[in-house]
Amino acid sequence: MKGKRLAVFGANTVVDEVTAYARKHGIVLVSVGNVPEAPMHQVSDEQYFLDCTDETVMLPFLKEKRIDGLLNCSGEMVIRKSVGWMAKTGFNYIHTHHQWDVLMNKQHFKEACIRYGMPAIPAFRLEDKDIPFPVIVKPVDNGGSFGVTVCHSRTEMEEAIAKAVRHSIVGEYLCEKFIEGPYFQFDIWRQNGKSYFPYTKGRVFYDAVGQSPCQPFLDLYPSPEADVISRLYEPMSQLFDDLGVDNGSCMFQGIISDGVPYIMDNAFRLSGGMDFRVVHEDKGIDLIACYMQHALTGQFGEDFSALAEPLHSRYATVCIGLKNGQITRIKGIDEVRQLPFVYSLYQYYHEGDTMQYSGLFLQVLCRIFVRADSRQELQSNINTILGLIEAEGTDGNSLLRDYPNT
């Protein structure tokens, strides 16, 4: 791969992984995007400030700059707007337009779950007479909790639908019964048409802000509900077989209600929770490297056999949530980085930045990746971290959200 030219879209949260793999293999990184301050622009070999969703701009650009492959680590909306033209490049690209439409349109994915015998949360439309409130309303094609509302009345539902439609490219919404129970998450990783399920996780949440859904405080690996989750593996694998997904990864989130695992969201892309760092730490398999290798050679990673084994240790990702306001002081992050049980840390906001997403997925000051040999040790490690982190606003008061009891 030495000397190959890789165009990169997004990749804000995987800059370290992308640059490390590129340097190891002599790959030329060509960052593309119209946000000059984007992290990838700061480390790439060449920078081009273009709208990467514009086919009329991108197709001639890729030819002119002699690009050999394309890595799209952007958010959901950018991929949705560009997945169609990417197929015209002839590059090794993970998604097809049809696969994306089935897996990343929430309504279409719900219909697929039903066809393949997987449980589906009951859905409703505004015109239905008997709606069992509370319900949750969301755009069919957006993530990060944008446009998502929990509703307790028809009036709230009407307002929520208008908001969801505004946040949807196709102008459609999905309304489902709001169910509660243990949270679960798992991934499917595909290599040469074979399925692997590298981890399961549970989650502890912050209290909800307003009508927004709860946001993560702790991600805990493995999930105590692993046996229940495994019921979904065979039908999910069959769905990916039939869609022709040979290589790539997809994340699934759900709720277990009365012993039944319901999938409520998924991401056929690199997800913001960065669960791939847990797998890399435990198994030594780097998902980002797999995507880069595939983009330039068509091969998605090397030996995946270790993914069939359970995780060897216990892991947690600590999400430090913030209230809205300008951040004037942050303390403790450097100390946390040095802790022997912290194997990775990603910081989103810095002193002088303003938080305006409290209550949404983007409320996180930093994600801290922790390992331990036991549940008790993991709890002790988490407590140590929480005692070190501080963040203050302009009035001198703490901007940290109240931590839930664990």
Image: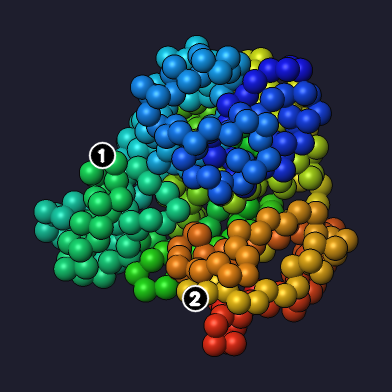
Tell which of 127 and 32 is nearer to you: 32
Q: Which residue is mark 2?
A: 325
Which residue shows up at 88% across the image and 61% down it? 340
SS class of the residue under badge 2? strand
Quarter of the figure that contains the N terminus: top right
Residue 274 versus residue 115 in the image, above or below: below
Residue at image location 80% in from the left, 54% down from the top: 343
- Where on the picture, by quarter, is residue 66? top right
Residue 233 seen in render: no
- Please identify the quadrant where the C terminus is shown: bottom right
- Three-letter amino acid code of the residue under disc 2: Gly
User: Quadrant of the rendered structure where residue 234 is?
Assistant: top right
Labels in figure, total: 2
Q: Is residue 138 left or right of residue 352?
A: left
Q: Secondary structure at mark 1?
A: loop
Q: Position of residue 85 (x, y in %)?
A: 39, 21
The residue indicated by pointer 1 is 170
- In the displayed structure, 318 sits above or below 312; it is below
